[in-house]
Image (cartoon, rainbow, N blue to C red):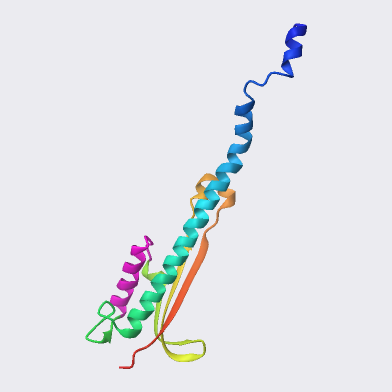
Amino acid sequence: MTRAAQRTIGTDVRGATAVEFALIAFPLLLFIFGITEFGRALWIRQGLQATAIAGARCVALVQPSCGTGGVYSASMSMSYVQTVAKGWMITLPTSAITLNTTATCANVTGFSQVTINYTFQTVVPVLIPALGTAAQLNAAACFPTQPS
């Protein structure tokens, strides 16, 4: 190597941007995916709570979506809760929904309660398996049962 070439090795900055980007790209993408997944989890949590509230009200008041002729129907109520969840783009299996027409809420009897247990699946484990586990999201709502 010539002396001129030796002097330019330490001062050559070609490719420095590519190296810097390579060093910062992974943490930056991880941060962006983290923000996105956190937002998705909050969206789903809010949707589950809104669904539980709507379901509890429907069950307690025996609205047409949850019963026929003022008579409560568990299957209609379950279908209604799943329909409300689909409006939030959440698919709920029937095993995730618990309906209770004789619940005690805050030590007071005479309530209808809907409880939803949902497993939030993130896309992060597909990208980085060590970072992702499924999170359990729960929502519950009570509404005073209408006297028959």
> Is the magenta region chiefly helix, strand or loop?
helix
Coordinates of residue 91 in the picture (x, y in percent): 37, 62
Task: In the rendered view, tell whether residue 82 sits above or below residue 25.
Answer: below
Numbered range of the magenta stretch: 74-92
Task: From the viewer's side, name the closer residue of 120 and 19.
Answer: 19
Q: Is residue 121 visible from the viewing direction of this image?
A: no
Does residue 124 appear left or right of residue 148 in this picture? right
Position of the C terminus by quadrant: bottom left
User: For the image shown, how many numbered marks are present on the structure?
Assistant: 0
Q: Which residue is drawn at 52% across and 48% down?
A: 33
Coordinates of residue 46 in the picture (x, y in percent): 45, 66
Q: Splitting the image into 4 quarters, where does residue 50 fall?
A: bottom left
Q: Which residue is drawn at 72% across and 16% down?
A: 9
Position of the N terminus by quadrant: top right
Q: Which residue is drawn at 57% across and 47% down?
A: 31
Q: Residue at x 34, y 68 (%)?
A: 84
